[in-house]
Amino acid sequence: MSAGRSPGTEIIMYGPRGMGKTVLLNWLENEVEKTAQDNRPLRTVQSTPTIFPSLKSLWNKLISDDWKKKLWPNQIELGAGGNKIVWNSKAPDDDDLVSALIEECKERPVVLLMDEAHTMDSRFCQGLLNISQQARQNAPFLLVLAGTPGLSHFLTTVNASFVERSKKMGIARLEAQATADAIVKPLDADGVHIAADALEHVVEDSQHYPYFIQLWGEALWDVAKEKDLQKLTSQEIAEVETKIENRRSNFYGERRNTLDELELLPAAVAIATVFQDTETTTRATLIDVIADNLPADSHATQSVNEHLQTLARHEFIWNPPDTDLYEAGIPSLMRYVLDRQREHVQKASPAAE
């Protein structure tokens, strides 16, 4: 974009909550700023749908004050007694706004980063995608949408067919080495080191899940500063692990309650049982499991598919990009669901007798 060329498509990033999408957007924003050339600077705008609930509010951020003056050349001001009344003799229409954005991007390319994109209003989303298409065809403009797995499905409902040609990036759990780096490097920057066996335990316990990596990183940094330590050992790991487990259990409890409220808990238990013996499974297997564990009036094919999509939107299961196979959104969440189910059965058994 710094060379004046527009990307071919939008970028759509999606993945379960806690996978670090917001962190990735922050990194992308920093990278854009670092690589911007002095003679053709780039501009990034990062936001969420709640900050820009309407396209007009988004225009106000995307279009600079200089271009606003060009759009409202006939602005009239009357002032008296310290009061000022301002109005426009002609308000710009949508075509004026698109043209202004295009001209602005020709002078200074824009990268728009929209987080939590799955929460967009349908009309806002359709308008935003149409704006992106028009702008990219005429000037350097890039739209990046980030959201949960439900984002991909949501975008198919807004009747913007060119979204199918967008570049889609599934955000999944980290590799083991990347997980270790995420723990070690921030601590190293503060002069704190971690023993090899302690690091191995943390990496395994985090399940390479960014949210849990963050919990561990914060807890280890806190204990190092509290005790003025330069090296963390298994002793410190044991001290903070209970705190980590408590926060994780609260996290899992909320997820389980949501599944229960959606009447998906029986299906979730059955799916978790399947994943005890495998890391991946097929859509057909999940469809059969869901159909066998829903109320009798919910066995229509459409209903089963909707329940599968709901389980995916709530990140209980995850279909990584470029594969037809499904895996656990968070493996230990499935174990938590199974453990709570066993406890429930054990408590109910004496009463049943």
Image (cartoon, rainbow, N blue to C red):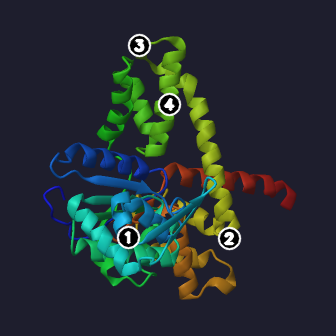
Residue under circle 2? 263
Amino acid type of the residue tagged 1 in the rendering: Pro
CA distance separating discs 1 and 2: 58 Å
- Horizontal placement of 262 versus 94: left or right? right
First reached walking from the N terminus: tag 4 or tag 3: 4
CA distance separating discs 2 and 3: 49 Å
Amino acid type of the residue tagged 3 in the rendering: Gln
Residue 226 location, quadrant: top right
- Which label belongs to residue 230? 3
Label 2 secondary element:
loop
Instruction: Name the quarter where the C terminus is drawn.
Output: bottom right
Q: Examine the rendering and report whether any part of residue 32 can be seen.
A: yes
Where residue 47 sits: x, y (%)?
45, 56
First reached walking from the N terminus: tag 1 or tag 2: 1
What crowding class fits label 4: few (fewer than 14 Cα within 10 Å), some (14-19), or many (20 or more)? some
First reached walking from the N terminus: tag 2 or tag 3: 3
